[in-house]
Amino acid sequence: MTLRSESMPHSLLLGVMGVILLAGCAGGTARNQVSNSASAEAQPALLAEQLSEDTKPDIPAYVAEPGHVLGLTPADVQDWLGPPDLVRRDGHVQIMLYKGTDCALDVIFFETNPEDHFRAGDLLARDSDGKAMNAATCLLGLAPGRRPQNGMPAPMDERIGMDTGRADSHAPGPEPSAERAVPHVKFPL
């Protein structure tokens, strides 16, 4: 029995010491929480100071692609590229001509049904000598870095779930029938 009474004070002493240790840890928590929240509030400002113009990530420039034009209405194209230099309408076909310093771009719209809106179905580009050129290059010259005002549509290939396998991302427009075949007309620059 004496053995038991001697071991009791040790366990009581250990219990008291454990409570004191826990109380000591809990006492510092409030102070640490205040300093942690203050440093968390200062982190965005500190991070902004550390980022200079040299260390900010490069964001790639917007690149206009012919596939972004295909499927748009004439109003959508005008919102993006501005008013065309010439508009020609013949039956179920409408052509808008945009002239740049180095090229001319024809945006050809088709109306598949009389009650439907015209939709861009093809692009034709020419250099200043009237020779055919890459539509993407001409479009880039006409709209360098300008995004469509109503947001950028996905390229036509993606909108219709089509994989053309073409490197220029140019999806074919509707196949013209014999009654609405459009001859390629050269417009002077």
Image: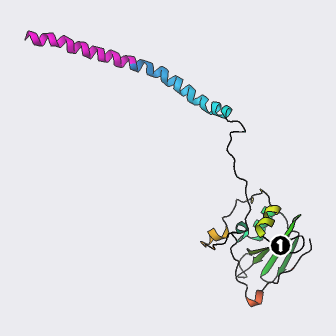
Q: What is the quadrant of the N terminus in the image?
A: top left
Find out whether residue 4 is within the magenta segment. yes
Check the image and name the residue furthest to the right. Answer: 188
Using the rendered view, name the quadrant where residue 109 is placed. Answer: bottom right
Q: Amino acid at mark 1?
A: Met
Left or right of 79? Residue 168 is left
Q: Residue at x 68, y 64 (%)?
A: 153
Using the rendered view, name the quadrant where residue 16 is placed. Answer: top left
Q: Residue at x 24, y 12 (%)?
A: 13
Residue 111 drawn above or below residue 82: below
Does the magenta stretch mainly form a helix, a strand or a loop? helix
Q: Callout 1: helix, strand or loop?
A: strand
Q: Nearer the viewer, residue 82 or 166?
A: 166
Check the image and name the residue furthest to the bottom. Answer: 178
**x, y percent for residue 120:** 74, 73
**x, y percent for residue 70:** 71, 71
Find out whether residue 148 is within the magenta segment. no
Q: Which residues are magenta?
A: 1-24
Q: Residue at x 19, y 11 (%)?
A: 9
Q: Nearer the viewer, residue 31 or 57?
A: 57
Q: How many residues crowd mark 1 within 10 Å: few (<14), some (14–19), many (20+)?
A: many
Using the rendered view, name the quadrant where residue 113 is placed. Answer: bottom right
**x, y percent for residue 62:** 73, 56
**x, y percent for residue 49:** 68, 31
Q: How many marks?
A: 1
Residue 48 drawn above or below residue 122: above
Q: How is the image coloured?
A: rainbow
Q: Which residue is mark 1?
A: 96
Q: What is the quadrant of the C terminus in the image?
A: bottom right
Left or right of 157? Residue 125 is right
